[in-house]
Image (cartoon, grey):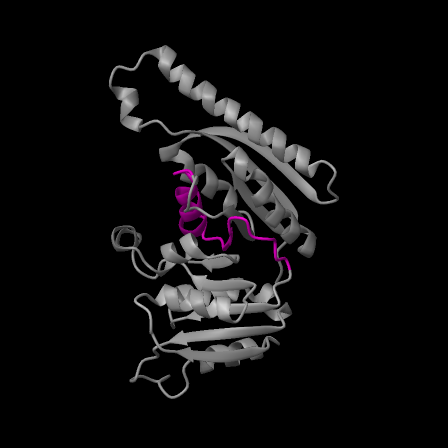
Amino acid sequence: MTYNSLFSVLTDESLVEETLAHATSMAARYDAHLDVLCLGVDRSQSGYYYSGASAIVLQETIARAQQEATAIETKARALLKNSSLRWAVEAGVSQLADLGRHVAARARFSDLVILAQPYGKGRGAELEPATESALFEARTPVIIAPAGGEPVPNPGRIMIGWNESNEALGAVRAGLPLLKEADVVHVVVIDPPTHGPNRSDPGGLLSQYLARHGVKVEIDVLSKTLPRVSDVLLRHARDMDADMVVMGAYGHSRFREAIFGGATRYMLEQATMPVFMAH
């Protein structure tokens, strides 16, 4: 298993260079083809179109999105033109409410999606649905490139957030090409259950599975000494100087995550290293 086809979505001209740095370094590492979708996003409220807006106003919003798409495409092509990679760039326009459909339609035919960090200062509202559509509709693993972070195509120290969930196991399976080449992989278990088949050996079956794939594994069992599990994960990732975090995305429903927050959202907000996620 390897990553032969990579995909990235660009919706903000200011994030083109940062996102493509991660995407191109990963493509170079695996000698993969990189497809880039440059989207100009019409961010106006969808109901606005049905409340008597004039044709001139509607045309202006579309024209603005087209200008954004052209600017993003121009910058992406300028950064890729001298590259030795195999790449393709496509530009288009989408309404915010329909963006996920366009992303998923292309992401589902890739092995790995590289996206900008969706939350934080100056991050557009379109980054969240782009991330969710790649994970849920396309069912494709995603690497979230942290704001200001350096590309890490060969992560030597990887931390797995392990909670026995199907989402976490799916992320591990999808991340095997990276895990097999790491110097060490830490399986992190927080407050393991005191009852159940794995109570005496938390993370043991996963470490056995990984070891059979040639992965060098260590198990770290931690206590939940901070209010959120994600706080503990992030602190441990920083303490061990992790190059990448691997975790399942949205173990709870997305509705609950949106209302109450959750490990997924908090990790995407606060992580300073690339986060590899799958659902």
Viewer-nearest residue: 146 or 131: 146
Above/below status of 194 relative to 113 = below
- Compared with 168, 16 (above or below) is above
- Rendered location of residue 126, percent (x, y): 41, 38
- Name the residue at 73% across, 42% down: 83
Residue occupying the point 51% across, 52% down: 146
Q: Is residue 231 left or right of residue 85?
A: left
Is residue 144 in the magenta section? yes
Residue at position x 51%, y 26% in the image: 68
Percent position of residue 98, x then y: 38, 34
Tell me residue 35's x, y (percent).
Answer: 60, 42
Q: Quadrant of the N terminus?
A: bottom right
**Which residue is farthest bottom?**
200
Tell me if residue 168 comes above or below residue 106 in the rendering.
below
Q: Is residue 100 above or below residue 227?
A: above
Image check: 150 left or right of 130? right
Residue in front for this viewpoint, 179 or 268 = 268
Q: Quadrant of residue 155?
A: bottom right
| Quarter of the figure with the C terminus | bottom left
Q: Which residues are the magenta region? A: 124-153
- Residue 27 in the magenta stretch? The answer is no
